[in-house]
Amino acid sequence: MSEMALIDGLASGFADETLQAQAAFRLILDAMARPGRIQRLTQPALAPQGLSPAAASVLAALADGDTPVHVPATPALRGFVAGRLGAPLAGEGEAAFAVVAAAGLLPLTRFAAGSDAMPDQSATVIVEVSALGSGPVLSLRGPGIREVEQLAVEGLPEGFAAAWAAQRALFPRGVDLVLCCGDRLAALPRSTRIV
């Protein structure tokens, strides 16, 4: 690969922009369609310090110049979003995508929840968790789940299940979550219930 091709690919966070972005996009769609199922990226995006490859892949596949993004205030993360992805930086309440550490996820109400008329104006929150596939188990029900899906996830804050239930009462408003750890991710769309 030429140096110029490598630089162009890095503009999106992917070494092979087209193929990796398409693969990541399909994987994210599959995760949203099958809440709680852990998905593994085989070729994740090149992540800056402070961001998992899975979280970088979600941003690189979904964010663009029209999607405001909130990330922690570190030069590496802000440079990745504004410089490489070309997405505008925004506060938590104005962001279409927000990246947070699991410990700082609550309250969910600080993120854009959309409105009854425009629920699509809500945020997707990319949550960096300690582990996927081990830890406390969430039992999930809802669209895309045949009976009950069991998702083991470590690092979610105390009170998460109650906050998620309170958000569900606002449906169709609310945020969607993409839980990320290393090269793996799982989605919790706002239509999913924790039982």
Image (cartoon, grey):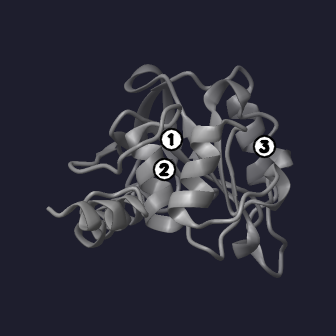
Quadrant location, the N terminus: bottom left
Question: Which type of secondary structure does the marked residue at label 1 adopt?
Answer: strand
Across and down, in percent, residue 87 comes to 62, 66
- Frontmost residue, 8 versus 43: 8
Question: Which type of secondary structure does the marked residue at label 3 adopt?
Answer: helix
State yes or no: discs 2 and 3 in contact (Cβ < 8 Å): no
State yes or no: discs 2 and 1 in contact (Cβ < 8 Å): yes
State yes or no: discs 1 and 3 in contact (Cβ < 8 Å): no
- Frontmost residue, 64 versus 158: 64
Classify residue 97 by image quadrant.
bottom right
Q: Is residue 17 left or right of residue 126?
A: left
Q: Residue furthest front?
A: 3
Q: Residues within 10 Å of mark 3 (few under 14, many from 20)?
A: some
Question: Label 1, on which residue?
Answer: 179
- Measured Cα–Cα span from mark 1 to mark 3: 14 Å
Question: Which type of secondary structure does the marked residue at label 2 adopt?
Answer: strand
Residue 61, compared with residue 42, is above or below; it is: below
- Measured Cα–Cα span from mark 2 to mark 1: 6 Å
Q: Residues within 10 Å of mark 2 (few under 14, many from 20)?
A: many
Give the residue type at disc 2.
Ala
Q: Is residue 152 left or right of residue 77?
A: left
Image disc number at residue 131: none
- Measured Cα–Cα span from mark 2 to mark 3: 16 Å
What residue is drawn where x is 70% and y is 74%?
120
Give the residue type at disc 3.
Leu
Question: Label 2, on which residue?
Answer: 187
Image disc number at residue 108: 3
- Frontmost residue, 10 versus 155: 10
Whichever of labels 1 and 3 marks the residue nearer the N terminus, that label is 3
What residue is drawn where x is 57% and y is 59%?
83
Q: Residue furthest bottom?
A: 117
